[in-house]
Amino acid sequence: MILTAEPQWQNKQLDVIVDLTPTKIYGDESLLYQVWQNLFHNAIKFTPENGTIQVTLAKNKDGQTEITIQDSGIGISQEDQLRIFERFYKADLSRQAKIGGSGLGLSIVKRIADLHEMKIAVDSSEGKGTKIIIQLPKQ
Ligand code: ADP
């Protein structure tokens, strides 16, 4: 998936760093593919040229497997972070920057994550970047 999106991130001269621990993930492959694709595409879309995107899959300190997609892009304000998983919601920063999109992607991501009992969280600050964390259920 990261390779299929390659023309998009190479056009922007983004540095994409991937560090995935091989892990079995149980679920609907095509739905989960939509999750990774959406999150990775958002990271590309909201990161200006020469930025960095980091994708990792690893255990956190509590032994829970987490997937993180971190970018060095425009970020999301605290206020908007509470609402980005709503249908059609677009944050102020992306409106200001006139970045297109329907505002639907993350609501679908959240639905799919819920179906798979995965927790999804956002950690972001304006101008510094965004980190989306997906915690897999205990297996
Ligand atoms: P869109 O189609 O607008 O990208 P999403 O549902 O995927 O819709 O995202 C909702 C909003 O959350 C986006 O419009 C944008 O304002 C914000 N957002 C999502 N991902 C990021 C990101 N990686 N960096 C900055 N803002 C983001």
Image (cartoon, rainbow, N blue to C red):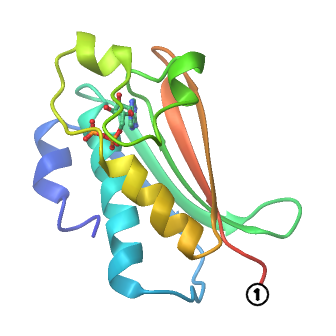
Asked whether residue 14 appears in the rendered view, the answer is no
Relative image position of residue 39 (x, y in whole percent): 38, 52
Asked whether residue 108 appears in the rendered view, the answer is yes
Q: Nearer the viewer, residue 81 or 51?
A: 81
Q: How many marks?
A: 1
Q: Quadrant of residue 81?
A: top right
Residue drawn at x 50%, y 15% is 126
Residue drawn at x 78%, y 60% is 60
Q: Quadrant of the C terminus?
A: bottom right
Please give left or right for residue 139 compared with residue 108 in the image.
right
Please give left or right for residue 83 compared with residue 39 in the image.
right
Q: Is mark 1 within 8 Å of ligand 1?
A: no
> Which residue is farthest front?
87
> Which residue is farthest top?
96
The correct choice, above or below, for 40 with respect to 19 in the image is above
Circle 1 residues within 10 Å: few <14, some 14–19, many ≥20: few
> Which residue is farthest right?
62
- Determine the secondary structure under disc 1: loop
Q: Quadrant of residue 2?
A: bottom left
Residue drawn at x 31%, y 30% is 47
* Amino acid type of the residue that numbered disc 1 sits on in the rendered structure: Gln
Name the residue carrying label 1: 139
Residue drawn at x 31%, y 62% is 37
Q: Quadrant of the N terminus?
A: bottom left
Please give left or right for residue 120 compared with residue 54 in the image.
right
Q: Quadrant of residue 51?
A: top left
Which quadrant of the figure shows ligand 1? top left
Relative image position of residue 99 (x, y in whole percent): 18, 25
Relative image position of residue 74 (x, y in whole percent): 38, 21
